[in-house]
Image (cartoon, helix red, strand yellow):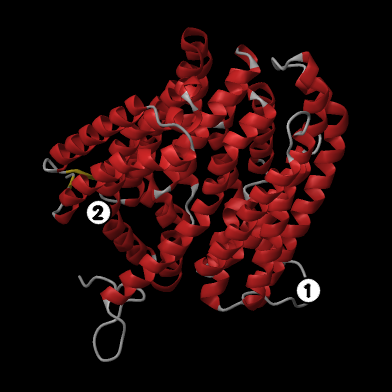
Amino acid sequence: MNRPAVPGAKSRGGRRSLGDYRSELAVLVGFNGVAQIAPIIAIFAITPLLLHRLGIDRFGVWTLALVALSTLAALDGGISASLSRFFAVHAAAGDRAEAGRLLLGALLFFLVLGLTVTALAFPLVPLIVGLFNIPAELEGEASAALRWVPMLAALALMADSSAAVLQGNSRFRALAGAMVASSLALVVAVVVLVQPGEHLGTLVVATALRYLMLIVVSLAFATRDVSIQRPLLPSRRARHELRSYAARMQLSAITAFVNGELDALVIAAFLPVRYVGLYGIAIQAASAVRSLPLYVFAPVLTRMTTTFGNHGRVAAAREFERFERAWLPAVLGYGVVAVATIAFAVPIWLGDGYRLSGEAAAVLLAGYMLHVGFTGMRTCYVRAVGYPGLETRYQLVWAAANALLTVPLAVLAGMLGVVAATAGTAAGASLYFVALCRRKEALPVTWPAHRWWPFAVAAGGITVVGEVVIVRAGHEGFLALALAGMPALAGLVVFAAALRRPTVTVAD
């Protein structure tokens, strides 16, 4: 049986080659990487400043506010997580008018939702603040800041909706520009507005400016991808299709909340609020390092969605197989080096007093990298073919197991017990997803080949030795953090040698 042609890859006679196809994808991944790393660099740059100006207790309160923001943003009906897929479908069909209706509908929905929840939050927030171990002198300031979190969540969702137009149209250069602009806006606003003392309110303003900048710049770039025509809002059929898809994505978002934000709430309930700040640093570091491989995610998802729309399910499955053979060994090898680095890197970055955050980050990252390696390309595939229910099923397993273990392990081992529950259940649920995709969609299972392991061990060992040398030299600070990346880079160079040969085996 003939294999379907690779979309975008054409043979001789003036048509595009497979090399052209790969080069184009590499460029998209590169610009998406810039888009994703810009806010990470911004957060890493301002975190030491925030710790200095706010103090660890007030920083812990702000971490709780960010948890509340993420929670509310996750409870949007799954719409924001679905938009890029539908914008990609409209782009493939050349339907700019329907894309415009979808964008206007999403922006209006999130604005109304934000105003409604903000009105409800004002009387309820003081009652909620009393449930956590927040020092009495910070309760009033915490309540004032948390009351505006729903509006921040609405702005974040509107910003995601605007950026989704660019992502769905493979406009990753423009997306990078928008993300860089919004990240710079955040840094400047924090430096200027947030001063020592009671300044959580100004931090809310700085965050709002970040999202507003992303909305404005994204919409300016997206003008050529949408057309505003009557009727202004999506049809009943289009809304039904979006709700049906988004409902399954909402379940995934809820499970993501249980597997991430719930940890901070459990820590806040059982430990002083400063531990929420220490946990916030750990998950910030682990999530940032985990995100680097995910720069591939958006371009691949857009590519698979377009392939599915133009060539069908079989062609999308062939693309999955090709991507997976490169993805799995590279991500797991990167994970070995990253885990070996991060426990040292956090105290190098912020000081020896944050060693607990580094240990927690290493535990989290170990689970995260197994999760990213085994689920990344499968997630792209199931979303592209319109079957996110498989993703939801494994995430429900992860959420149930994590919820069952988090509180007992928090009692037994404190913050490290909480993150161990998340990391361990992430690894187990990821393997379940692999088996599920094989059974339901016949996606092949790949594993690192025997020759992969010695290189991984050598890369990890070189990294640890280098980090120990830096720690003993006593270097600390943001510039020292860059120095801590040198042993990791050396480890990755060693591991890269393994990727020159086939590094996966396919299970029977």
Badge 1 or badge 2: first in the primary sequence: 1
The disc placed on residue 231 is 1
Q: Secondary structure at mark 2?
A: helix
Q: How many marks?
A: 2
Give the amino acid type for the residue marked by disc 2 in the picture: Arg
Which residue: 57% across, 34% down?
48
Rate crowding at label 1 as few (under 14), some (14 to 19) or many (20 or more) other CA atoms within 10 Å.
few
Q: Is residue 135 visible?
A: yes
Question: Where does label 2 land, which residue?
Answer: 325
Quadrant hosting residue 251: top right
Between residues 75 and 415, which one lies in front from this camera angle? 415
User: Please, is residue 443 above or below residue 73 in the view?
Assistant: below
Residue 390 drawn at (x, y percent): 44, 44
Residue 453 drawn at (x, y percent): 16, 38
Q: Is residue 433 visible?
A: no
Which residue: 65% across, 65% down?
218
Quarter occupied by the C terminus: top left
Quarter occupied by the N terminus: bottom left
